[in-house]
Amino acid sequence: MNKEVKEKAKEFALALKNHPDIAAYFKAQEKLEADKGTQQLISQFQEKQRELWLNQQERNLTAAEIMSFRNLQNRVISNPLIKEFSVAQNQAFEFSQSVANRLSELLGVDFATLISPPSSC
């Protein structure tokens, strides 16, 4: 790859990183990761998911187990940092998809297939 192409690729990557949707995603991710209470809530939720999945393999879940999980799920869903991250993640994904679609138009090929790892099949 020649030097000019590399330089343009770096400029493009920087422009993407600094786009408001992408910057908001990284900021929301940092806030989410820095909040110990939210991280503990996420860990607790993931552990409860695993626990219920394993219990479901062995037996029927009790109403109390399901209610406990739903209560925890509601705490996760209503957490402001998790909400902020989820919205930012969706906006960043939509923006990334629009960029990939525009690149596909400009290149005349499906850009996503150019960046996807080769299939092992």
Image (cartoon, rainbow, N blue to C red):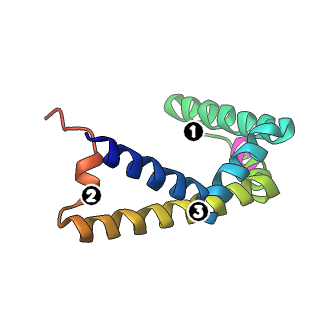
**Nearer the N terminus, badge 1 or badge 3?**
3
Check the image and report above or below for 110 versus 121.
Answer: below
Which quadrant of the structure image shows residue 62?
A: top right
Amino acid type, label 3: His
Q: Residues within 10 Å of mark 2 (few under 14, many from 20)?
A: some
Q: Mark 2 is on which residue type? A: Phe
Nearer the camera: disc 1 or disc 2: 2
Q: Secondary structure at mark 2?
A: helix
* Residue 98: x %, y % from top left: 41, 69
Residue at left offset 53%, top offset 58%:
15
In the picture of the structure, the residue carrying the numbered disc 2 is 111
Q: Whole-percent x and y of residue 2?
A: 27, 41
Secondary structure beneath dot 3 equals: loop
Q: Please state which of residues 83 and 109 is positioned toward the viewer in this rendering.
A: 109
Q: Secondary structure at mark 1?
A: loop
**In the displayed structure, would residue 48 be above or below residue 17?**
above
